[in-house]
Image: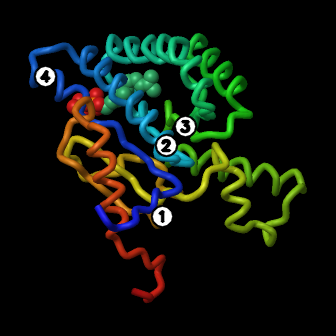
Amino acid sequence: MNEKITIPNHIGIIVDGNGRWAEQRGLSRSAGHRAGFTRLKNICLYAERLGLKYLSLYVFSTENFKRKKVEVDFLMNLFVEVFKKEFQELMDHHVKVVFSGRREPLPYNVLKVMDEISEKTKNNTSTVLNFCLNYGSQAEILDMTRNIAKQVLDGSLSIDDITLDTIHNNLYQDLPPLDLVIRTSGELRLSNFMLYQASYAEFYFPNIYFPDFMENDFWDAIVEFNRRNRRFGGNQS
Ligand code: FPP
């Protein structure tokens, strides 16, 4: 390929299709999530090799707590297992891990491993992996609004001083805007994923269940991103 490809600064992935991938093969949903995790790990390592600065991963929404208890429990245990098991490899690759989402009602063992991994990787300088876990964008906007309202009420902030920076500083994490959002499985929805951060993102919806989403599919998304003409509301071509 002759064209020079620019790696976006911040990519988001809405991980979707683990369940359907498993059902198609007569496997349990848990097997689909395990296969999804293996893929996710490889995509993270590939993103780091490409020099991607920020990768946000929507792995569990606030609404996912409505699923059957057995599936929720399986996923919570999987998070604990893999964050423990993969920790050293993340360190070896200098990856920094952060989490976005509400702590309630995540179980204690999940919160503990999340706190440990974010503390131990906080000074790492390679890719920032932002796991959206018990995350919902509407909840994030609500929590941000409450934080700002409290600062106004206690007198530390005046209404006239509220700017877009104030909003940014009161979101869950200090992250740049999303440049590209990928949702696997063929669904064409954002499903409450980083609505504010995705204001000017480009969207890419491959018709592939996540456990089949390979490195070359991720690369195809980046190539397609390079073909888009981003105007940010202006009219330059
Ligand atoms: C969406 O597929 C996937 C999830 C809700 C869970 C994502 C979890 C992982 C990739 C595994 C572990 C990740 C980490 C960070 C350790 P779905 O179940 O909604 O699929 P469906 O729409 O086909 O049912």
Q: Amino acid at mark 1?
A: Ser
Answer yes or no: disc 2 within 8 Å of ligand 1: no
Q: Earlier in the sequence, mark 4 or mark 3?
A: 4
Q: Earlier in the sequence, mark 3 or mark 2?
A: 2
Residue at 61% of width from left, 40% of height from top?
Answer: 126
Quadrant (top left/top right/bottom left/bottom right) for the N terminus: bottom left
Q: Amino acid at mark 3?
A: Leu
Q: Nearer the viewer, mark 2 or mark 1?
A: 2
Q: Earlier in the sequence, mark 3 or mark 1?
A: 3
For disc 4, the marked residue is 23
In this rendered view, identify the residue nearer to me: 221 or 63.
221
Quick one: SS at disc 3? strand
Q: Amino acid at mark 2?
A: Ser
Q: Quadrant of residue 158?
A: bottom right
Q: Residues within 10 Å of mark 3 (few under 14, many from 20)?
A: many
Q: Amino acid at mark 4?
A: Glu
Q: CA distance from mark 4 to mark 2?
A: 27 Å
Q: Is residue 155 left or right of residue 211?
A: right
Q: Coloring scheme of the render?
A: rainbow
Q: Earlier in the sequence, mark 2 or mark 1?
A: 2
Q: Residues within 10 Å of mark 4 (few under 14, many from 20)?
A: some
For disc 3, the marked residue is 129
For disc 2, the marked residue is 56
Residue at 56% of width from left, 25% of height from top?
Answer: 90
For disc 1, the marked residue is 199
Residue 12 in the image: state x and y as whole percent: 44, 47
Quadrant (top left/top right/bottom left/bottom right) for the C terminus: bottom left
Q: Would you say the residues marked 3 and 1 are in contact, meaning their CB atoms lie under 8 Å apart? A: no
The answer to whether residue 65 of the structure is visible from this angle is: no
Q: Would you say the residues marked 1 and 4 are in contact, meaning their CB atoms lie under 8 Å apart? A: no
